[in-house]
């Protein structure tokens, strides 16, 4: 039971420490929208989304007003479109993205995810068509997000898909060059993608999910940072315990919102994702949490250890607060979306290599990183391969959301605005990976994948 002290503490977190529910995401199955006629399939998709999520935004706003809990985003995730569009007699999947975009705008959500394909072991014709459509789809729509899963611990790494995704990211950047390559901010390449992720840009509604479901993502970097200020100089076991207690409180709030939204919408409650998702706002940074542990700047030696402690303590605190923790659940380190990460990258303390090392112990991976616009597609593919290998070997979700910013060089900055912030352009290694990427084929799954 929460007592008055707990309630007042939560109010302070909301008012002064940037505590919020980052998103209520409704997952919607589109499997019943398959149709040989692509026009009919698109109409079914629009109707299914608008009918299912008609009251999602209003419900979120009502909960905000009644409970005083900020809910930053209302979002939708759908069945990977490659599975749905594969039944249609068409080579052009861009209209499916238009249908998603139109439906999302009709119900008023911030983003819709699921222009996606799962190709960790091989690619169907539908998967290939979807990947080919990504640059145009993301350039021609406003709120559609895309993801492609190219590897898993069970299947290994599909290097043919990795090569394609390097080319696709470059093409997407060029198609949205007037926006600094913004289309790439809506595109994620995954290893071990999960079916119940409420966060964009990688959310999709897995085939193992119910017809509809409500997933909630909470966020509280500012709350954790504030809590650690009260244990300065204390041993790391005290630090871990402090983070666990804080994560417990944050997750309980998310659980409350999730169950309330579920009941009001008549949609089953799925999971609470307790990831620490930062914003560009001062005081809402994962990097500043790591620095509060004693690091002069995020990216210096000790950063990976500090992040490992943070991620583990967040998970331990969260699972005590909810029996339905899922999604990604840990700490995100998106460079452009974290004020402290931006500062560290600009100073040169935080490099692409250090970020790769940090992703071994956190939730996702190389996230919202800008690189020079003339970075070769093969280099981008090699960066993806490195990150996917970390996820495959360590049985964890990893991802790459990278922006080759057109016309930009190292030292420049790309402005995206809002929650996406600004990204300092970071250097890549100049040694060519062309021959490596050109081999194609599949990198086999590791020995420990044979668990059956």
Image (cartoon, grey):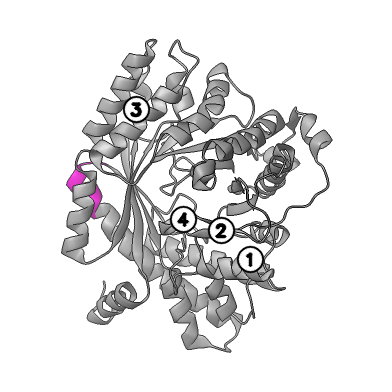
Residue indicated by mark 2: 423
Q: Label for residue 174?
A: none
Left or right of 59, for residue 448: right
- The image shows residue 276 at horizontal and vertical percentages of 47, 63
Q: Where is 42 relative to 366, above or below?
A: above
Are the residues at dot 2 and dot 1 in contact (C-beta closer than 8 Å)?
A: yes
Q: Earlier in the sequence, mark 2 or mark 3?
A: 3
Q: CA distance from mark 1 to mark 4?
A: 16 Å
Q: Secondary structure at mark 1?
A: helix
Q: Secondary structure at mark 4?
A: helix
Query: Is residue 285 shown to the viewer in this render?
Result: yes
- The image shows residue 402 at horizontal and vertical percentages of 60, 48
Q: Where is 232 relative to 285, above or below?
A: below
Q: Earlier in the sequence, mark 2 or mark 1?
A: 1
Are the residues at dot 4 and dot 3 in contact (C-beta closer than 8 Å)?
A: no
Residue indicated by mark 3: 99
Picture quadrant of residue 219:
bottom left
Residue indicated by mark 1: 345
Residue indicated by mark 4: 420
Dominant secondary-structure state across the stretch colored magenta: helix
Q: Going 48% across and 37% down the picture, which residue do you hit? A: 146
Q: CA distance from mark 2 to mark 3?
A: 31 Å
Query: Is residue 365 shown to the viewer in this render?
Result: no
Q: Where is 175 relative to 42, above or below?
A: below
In this rendered view, identify the residue nearer to me: 431 or 161: 431
Q: Going 29% across and 53% down the picture, which residue do you hit? A: 258
Which quadrant: the C terminus? top right
Q: CA distance from mark 3 to mark 1?
A: 38 Å
Q: Earlier in the sequence, mark 4 or mark 3?
A: 3
Q: Residues within 10 Å of mark 1 (few under 14, many from 20)?
A: many
Q: Which residues are magenta?
A: 260-267
Q: Secondary structure at mark 3?
A: helix
């Amino acid at each position: 039971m929460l007592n008055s002290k707990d309630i007042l503490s939560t109010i302070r977190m909301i008012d002064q420490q940037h505590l919020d529910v980052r998103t209520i995401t409704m997952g919607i199955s589109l499997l019943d929208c398959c149709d040989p006629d692509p026009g009919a399939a698109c109409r079914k998709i629009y109707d299914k989304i608008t009918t299912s999520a008609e009251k999602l935004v209003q419900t979120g706003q009502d909960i905000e007003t009644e409970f005083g809990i900020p809910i930053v985003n209302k979002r939708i995730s759908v069945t990977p479109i490659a599975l749905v569009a594969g039944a249609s007699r068409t080579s052009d999947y861009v209209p499916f993205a238009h249908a998603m975009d139109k439906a999302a705008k009709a119900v008023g959500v911030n983003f819709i995810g699921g222009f996606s394909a799962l190709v960790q072991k091989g690619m169907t014709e539908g998967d290939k068509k979807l990947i080919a459509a990504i640059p145009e789809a993301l350039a021609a729509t406003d709120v559609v997000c895309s993801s492609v899963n190219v590897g898993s611990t069970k299947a290994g790494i599909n290097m043919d898909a990795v090569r394609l995704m390097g080319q696709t990211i470059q093409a997407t950047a060029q198609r949205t060059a007037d926006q600094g390559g913004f289309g790439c901010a809506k595109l994620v390449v995954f290893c071990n993608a999960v079916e119940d992720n409420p966060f964009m840009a990688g959310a999709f509604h897995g085939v193992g999910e119910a017809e509809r479901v409500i997933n909630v993502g909470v966020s509280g970097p500012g709350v954790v940072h504030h809590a650690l200020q009260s244990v300065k100089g204390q041993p790391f076991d005290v630090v871990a315990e402090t983070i666990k207690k804080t994560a417990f409180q944050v997750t309980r709030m998310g659980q409350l919102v999730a169950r309330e939204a579920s009941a009001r919408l008549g949609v089953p409650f799925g999971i609470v994702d307790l990831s620490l998702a930062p914003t560009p706002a001062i005081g809402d940074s994962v990097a500043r949490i790591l620095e509060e542990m004693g690091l002069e700047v995020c990216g210096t030696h000790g950063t990976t250890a500090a992040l490992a402690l943070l991620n583990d303590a967040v998970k331990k605190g969260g699972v005590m607060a909810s029996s339905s923790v899922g999604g990604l659940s840990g700490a995100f380190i998106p460079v452009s979306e974290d004020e402290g990460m931006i500062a560290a990258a600009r100073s040169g303390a935080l490099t692409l290599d250090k970020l790769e090392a940090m992703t071994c112990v956190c939730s996702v991976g190389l996230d919202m990183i800008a690189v020079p616009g003339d970075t070769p597609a093969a280099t981008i593919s090699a960066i993806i391969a490195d990150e996917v290998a970390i996820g495959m070997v360590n049985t964890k979700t990893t991802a790459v959301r990278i922006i080759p910013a057109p016309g930009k060089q190292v030292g420049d900055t790309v402005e995206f605005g809002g929650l996406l912030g600004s990204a300092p352009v970071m250097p890549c290694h100049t040694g060519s990976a062309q021959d490596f990427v050109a081999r194609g084929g599949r990198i086999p799954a590791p020995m420990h994948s044979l668990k059956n």
